[in-house]
Amino acid sequence: MRKKVMIVVDSDPRQGPRAAEALRVAAGLAAWMTNEITLCLMGPAAMLLHGNGDLIGDEDIRMAWSVLREARAAVFVDAVPPANGPAPGTVRQITPPAFARLAAQADYLLRF
């Protein structure tokens, strides 16, 4: 049975490597295809969707999106999602009640 792993990222990818590390961890967990990954980008972490080259860890970010796309990870943001970017599939906006439901359903929750 696949474990549900929710990764919440709210760190600013312009200020340090923490957000890029969160994507790298998500990609590592997704690569084995034994986990169902849900990625929630909150606040400034939504900038990870743009991949415009000015973020700390930009190369790791691009590689992680590739793995997450292949694993069909669910990606949510707490703001209006951008029309384009490197994120896998469809990026959906999440409300606080929906976030709480997803968190309650997760077997594991990691916060970066």
Image: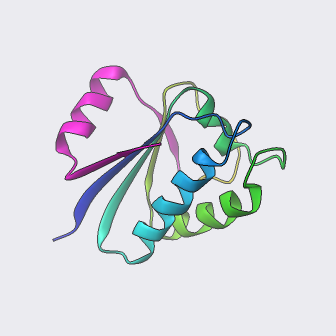
**Is 76 on the left-hand or right-hand side of 54?**
left
Residue 52 at what x, y percent from top left? 82, 46
Q: Residue furthest top?
A: 96
Residue 26 at what x, y percent from top left? 46, 59
- In the image, residue 104 lies in the stretch drawn in magenta: yes
Residue 42 appears in the picture as rendered: yes
Which residue is depicted at the point 74% across and 37% down? Answer: 14
Which stretch did the figure color magenta?
88-112
Residue 88 appears in the picture as rendered: no
- In the image, residue 70 lies in the stretch drawn in magenta: no
Residue 22 at what x, y percent from top left? 52, 52
Q: Quadrant of residue 62?
A: bottom right
Which residue is depicted at the point 31% across and 61% down? Answer: 36
Question: In the rendered view, would you say 87 is above or below 14?
Answer: below
Q: Quadrant of the N terminus?
A: bottom left
Question: In the rendered view, would you say 109 is above or below 69?
Answer: above
Residue 2 at what x, y percent from top left? 22, 68
